Structures are given as structure tokens and as C-alpha cells.
Amino acid sequence: MSNSIKRIGVLTGGGDCPGLNAVIRAVTKTAMFKYGLEVYGIEDAYLGLIRNRIRPLSSGDVSNILTTGGTILGTSNKCNPAAYDANGDGQVQDCTDRCIEHVKLNELDALVCIGGDGTMSGAASFVEKGINCIGVPKTIDNDIVGTDVTFGFATAVDIATDALDRIHTTAASHHRAMIVELMGRNAGWIALHSGIASGADVILLPEIPYDINAVCDHVTQRSKKGKRFTIIAVSEGAKPAGGEQVVAKVDPTSPDPIKLGGVGNVIADQIQRITGVETRCTVLGHVQRGGSPIPADRVLATQFGHAAIECLMHDHANRMIVMQNGQVTDIDILDVANKQRTIPADHPLVAAAEAVGTCFGV
Ligand code: F6P
């Protein structure tokens, strides 16, 4: 059992997702109640470390937050401590030493970094300079390597499935092809799971480049069979075979500058033009990240937050908490940075969806 850890810092980084507060609560309560540690909250991800915006958390601060969306600490997906535009003049500089000064000034013996691959990369730069960081993987995209699942994903799938279900009834009424564009960056997990859960007729994923003619054939075949509507779940990262992803904007201030979006409307225009079937697109957007986590994410977040403190107190340094084959365990945090877990082409869910007639646009 570690005797050297008395005070820890906790931060949330990257895009928010449902369940962040549940992790903060589990980390803080486990640290305080079980081990008598002091917990400090770092505001707005690594920005709070750069600017020394760090404050003690009380048990009251983490009461009644299990079910709430967002993060009480704030977050940022614009702040890479190794390359940050600290003066707002467009010139990035390495701020890791400044962060480490603030870790020392606040006498933090370890950091719990709750975030995605960008946050883990930031943590890796501190680990390399001797700061003990424990990572907790979050993202609606479910694309962090080493873990079978991230918290936030199940809630996003729930929201996306609800949207697809609702689109179903209006598509049927109007005899339309209806597209729902879903988040996920370069991983199609949200579209795959919600597409299967809602019985989407077509699912388009970044991992399986589509042929627009195959999609249109599917729409036409359904019409010929008397099915007068088609539901299409499109991942924002989907791209045509031999073509490119659709980029909504480039944000040079973000460590993840490419913001995907727009492919749904591109496909809608093509389907309407090629098949003559009236087609509409709904872009679900950030609603997938908002609101209360569903129970499965509250449970997972609590398990992960608790495990982060157990990991620290059992002297496991520089680990990221993961779920592997139904067991919570941990892996080297340095093995995670700058990697993405995408859907393998031979994934059993793809095979199951194909078996029930879902078209992947090939
Ligand atoms: O990584 C989470 C995510 O919601 C992605 O699915 C999406 O591509 C991206 O973040 C959107 O980023 P932003 O919040 O910067 O628009």
C-alpha cells in the first residue's frame, strides 16, 4: 500500500461525455473515504495546470453529481501542454514544465487524467518527466485502444438509437430515405451499434468505404419490394471508396484539428439524384454527448474511478484503467497515446448486421 501518496489532482480533458462527473465522484470519494487522501480539482483540463487553476474538492463538491451530464471541472479540447499557444499570438510553446511546476506547487503526488487519446498523450508527456499519471478512458467514440469500452459510449448509442427510431416513423409516413449522421471521428462504433439497435437498412462506417451505387441499389431494391422508406445511419467519418472524408472545419488551435461533418448531406443529395427517392438528412451532433449518463455508464464510470485510486494506492504508476473481457484492469498509459481503436472489417457485429440484410454500402 502506498504511503507516499497524500494528495492527488483530477482533471477531465477533451470533448465532454456523459459519465465524467460519475468518475470524478468515484475518484474523490474513494480517495477521501477509503484512503484519507486530499483531492484537488484541476479546471478545464491541462489549461488549469498551465494557469494554476487548481482547487481542493470536498465531498460536498461531488455530492449529487452521479447522474449529471458534463463535467464540474470543465474541459478543453484545445490544450496540448506540449504545444500550447499560451500568449494567444499563434505561436505554440512547450508548457509541460510550467504544468509540472504547478503540480509541485500544489503538492500533488499524482494526477488522475480522465480523457481520450489526446488527454492520454498529454499525460504521457508528464509521465516522461516523472509525474505519476493514472488515465481513465472516456469518449463517446469508443475508440481508445486497450479497452473494450469507454464510458459515455453506451449513452451516445442510446441517444443515437432513439433518434434513428424517431426518424423511422417519419420516414415511413413520407416514404423517404432518411439519413442520420452520427459522431465517432474515424471510428464507426456509434453508427454500428445504434444502426443495429434501430434496424437501420444501411450503415456507413469510416472503416468500410462505401460505393454510392451500392447504397442507391439498396434503396431501389427496397422500393421494388414495396418497402417505401429507407433508414441510413452514417458515421461522420464515412468516406467513399477511393475518396476522402468530409471535413466540416479545421481548427488549428485544437490538438485534433480536423472536425468531420457533412457527409450525410452529401449522400442525401446523391441518393435523391440517382434514385429519385426523396431523401433527408439529420445531423445529430453534440446532443450525443449531452445530458445524463444511462445506468450502464454510471456503473462503468464508478468502477473506473474506483479502480484509478486502487491502482495508485497499490503503487501501480502510469497506468490507464481499462475493461478487458468483462474485467476492470490496467495497462501502460504510454501504450495508448496517439492510437485509435477502429472497427475491424471482420468484426462479428458487421457479420451479424449483414446476416439480417443490412447494407454497408459495398
Ligand atoms: O471525440 C468526441 C467527438 O464528439 C467526436 O465524435 C467528434 O468528431 C468531435 O468530438 C467533435 O469535436 P468538437 O466538440 O470539437 O466539435
Image: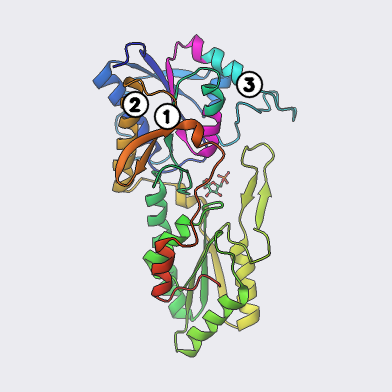
- Write the start and end of the magenta stretch as one range: 103-123
Identity of the amino acid at label 2?
A: Cys
Which residue lies under the disc numbered 3? 95
In-front residue for pair 62/154: 154
User: The residue tagged with tag 3: helix, strand or loop?
Assistant: loop
Asked if 239 appears above or below 290 in the picture, the reply is below
* Disc 3 crowd, CA 10 A, few/some/many (<14, 14-19, 20+): some
Distance (Cα) linking label 2 and label 1: 8 Å
Distance (Cα) linking label 3 and label 2: 27 Å
Please tell me the numbered disc located at residue 319. 1
Q: Where residue 260 sits in the image (x, y, percent)? A: 61, 53
Asked if 162 appears above or below 331 in the picture, the reply is below
* Disc 2 crowd, CA 10 A, few/some/many (<14, 14-19, 20+): many
Q: Are marks 2 and 1 in contact (CB under 8 Å)?
A: yes
Q: Is label 1 or label 3 in front?
A: 1
Residue 75 appears in view: no
Identity of the amino acid at label 3?
A: Cys
Which residue lies under the disc numbered 2? 311
